[in-house]
């Protein structure tokens, strides 16, 4: 006897468990993992998804009911995505429902938009006879409608019901008499419909052809590998992507292009749109639910072949996916910060394996993880070491801010950077100033007693904004800026560090005639704000662009000849083992924005730590030197990718209960490690980096070991232990427990 474990349709949140059903003999060949089925559930029949096939009954076989059948309309692509959800659930530690909601993000039926036209079915002679009859019987509405159809044969439905004031009932009646036919076509919302296609005339250089040839040769031999394309900024990686996609499209297959930020969408999509036209679409969080629903429907229907977007675009339901490209693959935004905490890179590789597809990971500064995998031979390394047309990489200068202070310069801009900005203004060239912060300042502190103004609900400082309001970026708490220190009543309260707003005001004072645009989280809240700001700067409507990380990732502005990185080491000295990697990548990407046109570029890095290897290797654009030092550091401290790390997050509103529960979990892990003799480093439970958010306490437990599978086994063991707690009051019942494998940010 064969059985199917089925999870009830994900629209029912409370039923986050599987139920077992017997597979009737006549359905055995039709039932597979991922198939949507109709099942008896109580007195109702509901739909569900098969998550597992087994020959082992979980309960008394006499109580296991049979499946009703395969759900009408169940398609293979849904089955594949459900199988992918099962993989995510196992490898990242979530419930199956959470994984399903990730891979099938638009399950709720969205109202379709339709276009109706009314067409005459009668010959001219027959229509003339009917018209005479209607006029004789004084059926004025029918006569008016028929006259319009005789004149035009086909008319828009809304024109008839609107301008001509003909009732829908009249139209239905004449349709029933076979006088006319109402034709309905589905209208898809298209987020790139407003784009204007331009000519595409790029020709690949020899380096680009070499890379394309290597991948295409493997494809033609039936090899579908994961490639790491390491290409310096401006080397033409996007042209390589498009050539590979063109090859895949010729085979009748489709492609997904992942990008790290919504801010990249406009420029990236325009380049693809100019080559592939209406076969391209986008997904991002700025789209409405209706727009997102339609893009998935278009993909299923074969209306598009290329989907571009951040993480969620990976789950586009293409029927025959042949290629997945992850641009700027080093970006942390490819790792989900919500459960399931999946990484798009590993998930893309798994989905590609299911489709016999290829994966290309592209970056000027590959993640240490990916470069390590390439060094082991798990990824094939391909390189583009020169810019297109042999344009030189920008020269770079490091300015020691300590020396600036000794010389009496307290300005946000060093003397050297001010001099270079003035030079660019005189030459009608553009400048980008990058700072990885938002708001007017980081925090307010008392210079007398050291008190920091903090959120009463979270263990974080409040940020000062231009409205003189202090805001918590974790829970949204606000309060006015205090005039005196709440602790010692001193008036020596001051802001620490500068934000993009303050830099903008300062730059305007130094260069009053300069046209300045600011781009950060506060100026890009509306749907089209990214596109408008980037387009304005591309059209040279501004001389200086000031912004956060989003301005240094992937943009191509030919007239930008100067990039200034302000306080480069701001991301360097934080409690996160990725800090060096993060800083190197940011600086390298920022430097690479300069000199992408015909004019040479220059970059200035301002820092308080000019000798740090991440800053020096970024200045030299020397990835290999950076990697050698960084991987040695990771090896010495047993950090990923050399070892693997699992963080167990526990949170609850009562601190004592949380500590007790976290202690039990840690003891259970210790016992398992001892029983199995595994080499695992265990730390914790300890307070999380932010131990209290919005009155909820947070604890973490860390586990490090060489084998990822060992961590998966420990996770599974913890889940079984939590479920097996049969005490009258299960201590874990109200505590939120989440798993994060190889986290990419602070924890």
Image (spheres, rainbow, N blue to C red):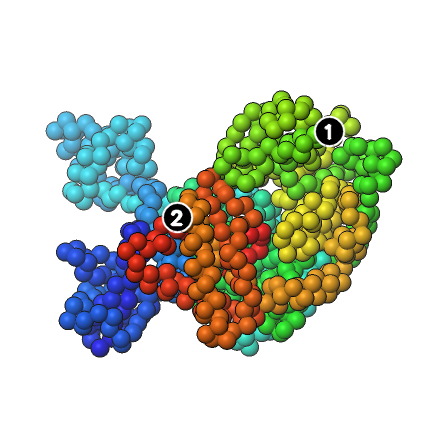
Q: Which residue is depicted at the point 27% across and 75% down?
A: 56
Q: Which mark is residue 213?
A: none
Left or right of 336, for residue 493: right
Which of the two labelled residues, at mark 1 and mark 2, occupies the earlier sequence position? 2
Q: Which residue is mark 2?
A: 293
Q: Which residue is depicted at the point 55% across and 52% down?
A: 747
Q: Residue 142 in the image: x percent, y percent?
A: 20, 32
Left or right of 174, for residue 342: right
Which quadrant of the figure has residue 640? Answer: bottom right
Q: Residue 244 in the image: x percent, y percent?
A: 58, 63
Left or right of 134, for residue 388: right
Left or right of 542, for residue 75: left
Which quadrant of the figure has residue 367? Answer: bottom right
Q: Work out whether 212 lies above or below 693.
A: below
Judge by depth and name the residue closer to the eye, 414 or 192. Answer: 414
User: Dot 2: within a 10 Å radius of its alpha carbon, few (fewer than 14), some, or many (20 or more) residues?
Assistant: many
Which quadrant of the figure has residue 539? Answer: top right
Q: Secondary structure at mark 1?
A: helix
User: Dot 1: within a 10 Å radius of its alpha carbon, few (fewer than 14), some, or many (20 or more) residues?
Assistant: some
Circles 1 and 2, Cβ within 8 Å, touching? The answer is no
Nearest to the eye among marks 1 and 2: give it. Answer: 1
Question: Number of numbered discs present?
Answer: 2
Q: Secondary structure at mark 2?
A: helix
Q: Which residue is depicted at the point 73% across and 45% down?
A: 568
Q: Which residue is mark 1?
A: 506
User: Label 1 vs label 2: CA separation?
Assistant: 45 Å
Q: Residue 1 in the image: x percent, y percent?
A: 22, 77
Judge by depth and name the residue closer to the eye, 334 or 383. Answer: 334
Q: Residue 502 in the image: x percent, y percent?
A: 68, 30
Q: Which residue is depicted at the point 77% across and 44% down?
A: 607
Judge by depth and name the residue closer to the eye, 640 or 688. Answer: 688
């Amino acid at each position: 006897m064969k059985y199917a474990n089925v999870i009830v349709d994900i629209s029912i949140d409370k039923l986050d468990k599987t139920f077992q059903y017997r597979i009737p003999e006549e359905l055995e060949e039709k039932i597979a993992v991922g198939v949507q089925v109709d099942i008896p559930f109580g007195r109702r029949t509901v739909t569900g998804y098969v998550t597992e096939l087994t020959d082992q009954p979980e309960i008394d076989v006499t109580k296991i009911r049979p499946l009703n059948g395969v759900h009408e309309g169940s398609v293979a692509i849904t089955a594949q995505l459900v199988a992918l959800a099962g993989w995510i659930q196992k490898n990242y530690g979530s419930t199956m429902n959470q994984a399903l909601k990730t891979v099938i993000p638009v399950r709720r039926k969205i109202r379709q938009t339709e276009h109706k036209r009314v067409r005459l079915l009668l010959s001219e002679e027959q229509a003339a006879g009917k018209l005479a009859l209607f006029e004789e019987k004084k059926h004025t509405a029918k006569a008016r409608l028929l006259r319009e159809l005789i004149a035009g044969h086909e008319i828009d439905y809304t024109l008839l019901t609107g301008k001509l004031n003909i009732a829908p009932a009249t139209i239905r009646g004449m349709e029933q008499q076979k006088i006319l036919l109402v034709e309905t076509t589905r209208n898809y919302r298209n987020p790139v419909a407003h784009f204007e296609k331009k000519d595409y005339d790029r020709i690949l250089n020899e380096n680009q052809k070499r890379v394309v040839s290597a991948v295409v040769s493997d494809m033609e031999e039936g090899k579908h590998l994961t490639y790491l394309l390491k290409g310096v900024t401006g080397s033409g990686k996007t042209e390589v992507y498009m050539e590979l996609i063109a090859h895949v499209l010729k085979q009748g297959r489709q492609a997904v292009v992942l990008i790290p930020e919504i801010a990249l969408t406009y420029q990236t999509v325009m380049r693809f749109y100019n080559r592939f036209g209406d076969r391209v679409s986008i997904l991002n969080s700025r789209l409405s639910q209706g727009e997102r629903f339609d893009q998935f429907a278009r993909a299923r229907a074969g209306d598009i072949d290329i989907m571009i977007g951040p993480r969620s675009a990976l789950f586009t339901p293409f029927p025959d996916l042949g290629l997945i490209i992850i641009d700027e693959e080093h970006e942390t935004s490819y790792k989900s910060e919500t459960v399931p905490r999946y990484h798009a890179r590993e998930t893309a590789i798994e989905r590609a394996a299911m489709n016999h597809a290829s994966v290309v990971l592209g970056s000027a500064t590959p993640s240490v993880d990916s470069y390590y995998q390439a060094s082991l031979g798990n990824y094939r390394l391909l390189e583009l070491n020169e810019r297109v047309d042999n344009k030189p990489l920008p020269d770079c200068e490091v300015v020691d801010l300590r020396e600036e202070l000794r010389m009496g310069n307290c300005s946000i801009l060093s003397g050297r950077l001010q001099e270079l900005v003035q030079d660019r203004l005189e030459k009608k060239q553009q400048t980008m100033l990058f700072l990885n912060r938002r708001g007017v300042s980081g925090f307010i502190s008392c210079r007398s007693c050291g008190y920091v103004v903090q959120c009463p609900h979270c263990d974080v400082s409040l940020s000062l904004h231009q409205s003189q309001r202090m805001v918590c970026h974790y829970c949204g708490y606000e309060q006015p800026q205090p005039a005196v220190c709440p602790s010692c009543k001193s008036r020596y309260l001051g802001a620490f560090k500068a934000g993009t707003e303050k830099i903008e005001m300062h730059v305007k004072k130094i260069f009053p005639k300069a046209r300045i645009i600011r781009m950060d989280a506060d100026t890009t809240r509306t749907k089209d704000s990214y596109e408008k700001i980037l387009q304005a700067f591309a059209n040279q409507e501004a001389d200086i662009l000031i912004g956060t990380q989003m301005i240094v990732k992937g943009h191509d502005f030919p007239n930008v000849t100067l990039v200034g990185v302000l306080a480069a080491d701001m991301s360097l000295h934080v409690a996160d083992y990725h800090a060096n990697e993060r800083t190197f990548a940011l600086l390298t990407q920022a430097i690479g924005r300069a000199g992408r046109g015909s004019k040479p570029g220059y970059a200035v890095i301002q820092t308080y730590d000019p000798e740090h290897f991440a800053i020096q290797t970024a200045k030299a654009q020397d990835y290999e030197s950076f990697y050698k030092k960084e991987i040695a550091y990771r090896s010495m401290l047993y950090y990923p990718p050399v070892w693997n790390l699992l963080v167990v997050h526990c949170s609850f509103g009562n601190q004592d209960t949380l500590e007790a529960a976290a202690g039990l979990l840690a003891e259970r892990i210790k016992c398992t490690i001892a029983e199995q003799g595994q080499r695992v480093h265990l730390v914790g439970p300890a307070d999380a980096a932010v131990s209290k958010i919005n009155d909820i306490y947070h604890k973490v437990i860390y586990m490090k070991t060489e084998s990822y599978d060992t961590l998966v086994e420990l996770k599974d063991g913890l889940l079984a232990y939590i479920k097996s707690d049969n005490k009258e009051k299960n201590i874990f019942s109200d505590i939120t427990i989440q798993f994060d494998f190889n986290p990419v940010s602070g924890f």
